[in-house]
Amino acid sequence: MKKSIRRELTVKSTIVARGLTKKFGDFVAVDNVNLDVKEGEIFGFLGPNGAGKTTTIKMLTGTLKPTSGKVQILGLDMDEHEIDIKRMIGVVPDEPKIYEHLRGYEFLEFVSAIFKTNFSDVRQRIEELCNAFQIDYLDKLVSEMSHGMKQKLMLVSVLMRKPKVLFLDEPTVGLDAKSARVLKELLKKYSNEGTTIFMTTHILEIAEKMCERVAIINRGRIIAEATVSELKNTYKASLEDIFLQLTAEEDIREIVENL
């Protein structure tokens, strides 16, 4: 008899994946991924383009069904409690997908209604977040906004609800330097308050400074998982050098020399 995933959990496990696999035809995008992310942890999920990061996040958040494997969020099985889980988590995708015909404030009202949040209850929080991210364009149509403007609007739509778990796929892409700094400081604050944060990033400096633990995925498989300090002690190198050593198929210096 298979061991119950619930028995494997510790009290403070917030995100758990066991044997998570996704196949598209014969192509294995994610291969037997196991994860255990604790309450209040900032967990970095790193990998080159096409490694399986976004596919993994989609399975962890219930937007893509795994071929096999199990997911639990906040102690709930995704198969049995998908709707309940989606109400408790916040997801910022790699590309902000927002209805183009809505104005900024209409989009926030729409999100509030979907999650059954009283808009008047989050109005002050929206104002605070808009001030922090320098958003003064809520009257604009989304179709008139730049990528960076849409990204900040998406962040506000998620953070205004104060979800217990945040999934962020390349959250700083498109943000100006000040907004990126604001986001990083907010994530640290939320982590200290008990929010669990699962994030992907190509900016390894961010992962090195912010994440307690990181996992590196390549070709759908996790090839390393540890605290940043443990990785650096093991490989005697920076996180960037470790990442390239584990994922690069060719020596970077040889590539440059041949140009």
Image (spheres, rainbow, N blue to C red):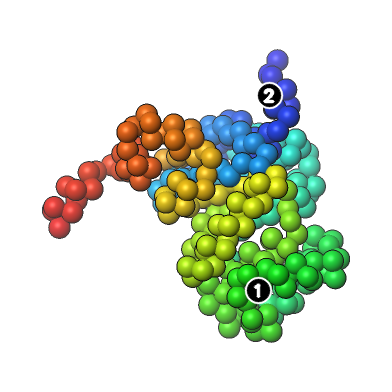
Crowding at mark 1 (Cα within 10 Å: few <14, some 14-19, many 20+): few
Outermost residue to the left: 258
Residue 199 visible in the shown view: yes
Element class at badge 2 = helix
Q: Identify the residue shown where x is 78% and y is 42%.
A: 81
Q: Tell me which corner region of the image, top left, top right, bottom left or bottom right, holds residue 248.
A: top left
Q: Which residue is mark 1?
A: 131
User: Who comes first in sequence, dot 2 or dot 1?
Assistant: 2
Element class at badge 1 = helix
User: Against 248, is 159 above or below?
Assistant: below
Residue 76 location (% of width, % of height): 76, 37
Q: Identify the residue shown where x is 51% and y is 68%.
A: 178
Q: Quadrant of the C terminus?
A: bottom left
Residue 83 location (% of width, % of height): 78, 49
Amino acid type at circle 1 is Asn
Please tell me the numbered disc located at residue 8. Answer: 2
Q: Tell me which corner region of the image, top left, top right, bottom left or bottom right, holds residue 162.
A: bottom right
Measured Cα–Cα span from mark 2 to mark 1: 43 Å
Q: Identify the residue shown where x is 61% and y is 33%.
A: 36
Amino acid type at circle 2 is Glu
